[in-house]
Image (cartoon, grey):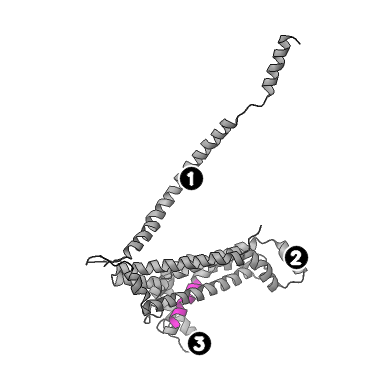
Amino acid sequence: MTATAASSTAGQAAATRPRYTGGRAAAGRRARFDRDSRSAVGFLSFNMAGFALFTLVPVVLSVYIALFNWPLTGGRTKFVGLGNFSTALSSYGFWRIVLNTLYFVGVYTTLNLIVSLALAAALSPRVKAVKGKAFLRVVFFIPVVTPLVASSLVWSLMYNQGGIINAALGAVGIPAVPWLTSGPWAMPSIIFMSLWLGFGYNMILFIAGMTNIPDSLHDAAAVDGASPLRRFFSVTIPLLSPLIFFGTLLTLITSFQVFVQAYVLTGGGPGNASTTMVLDLYDEAFRYLRLGYGSSIAVLLAIMILIVTAVMFWLQKRFVFYER
């Protein structure tokens, strides 16, 4: 082989040898990652600024103020440590209000889930017997987007002694009920109004989940002889359990914070029969001007919500089914 031929062969081998470009590729990936990171920070910065300004800072200040005897107007602030918490936890009236809140949360959340699941099952695309399902979904969802204060004012007129509800009861021979002025009826009235206002959200959520359940699973269960009710509890409910968990958790958190309904309908009365924790902290802070004591109630409410949330996440490991 001549020297020229050897040189040509070596050149061809060098041309066909794969070149190492790992360093440049890695540098390109890092550059793209840096650009994406900067873009993500830019998009998130406004939301995070709003979260810090309107959520994080108020939470920190609320905990701080709860450690003081802090009159809203006039007077001097005085550090009392855990004194406000001790006063609240040793008060019979406070525990009565806690029981009112737990009563509302338990009954409202249970009824909300039952009604929303039942209506979602009836209005799901798989059910052919119900006509006008799209219209009914809109009708049931409208209260969710209706202004809360306006809805409460309308319901206060309906609950009035001469309102439409008592008129309907009188038409069938039932005496008028003092819905908002009787201790035993005040909280159930708020619960019923809140149920009408809030079940539409979970209903739409569950309808969306039922729509995504494969028909083949229901068909297989039907071939095995399962009745529609058995298919609902053995197929639909397990596959819908992640959305049920989400809806339950969201409903629990929002129901602990019930305020407008009690404030507009009953003002917490009669007595303290319908006073909730948020209404109580509002009264203490802005009616009686004891901002420190009101902030301590807010902190205790936040602790209760955190405990309930932790219990729910613990229970989901046992009762929530996730498809693999």
Residue visible at 54% across and 74% down in the picture: 110
Amino acid type, residue under disc 1 in the picture = Ala
Residue 95 percent across, percent down from the top left = 40, 77
Which residue is disc 2 drawn over? 220
Residue at x-position 64% and y-position 62%: 211
Residue 250 lies, in percent from the top left, at: 51, 65
> How far from the left and from the top, in percent, is residue 76?
22, 65
* Residues rendered magenta in the picture: 185-196
What secondary structure is found at the residue carrying circle 3?
helix
Please indicate whether residue 184 sits to the left or right of residue 130 in the image: left
Relative to 68, does residue 156 appear above or below in the rendering?
A: below
> Relative to residue 7, is residue 86 drawn left or right?
left
Is 192 a magenta residue? yes
State which quadrant residue 243 falls in: bottom right
The numbered dot on residue 40 is 1
Q: Secondary structure at mark 1?
A: helix
Q: CA distance from mark 1 to mark 2?
A: 46 Å
User: Looking at the image, is mark 3 or mark 1 nearer the viewer?
Assistant: 1
Report x, y in % for residue 190.
Answer: 45, 76
Q: Nearer the viewer, residue 254 or 170?
A: 254
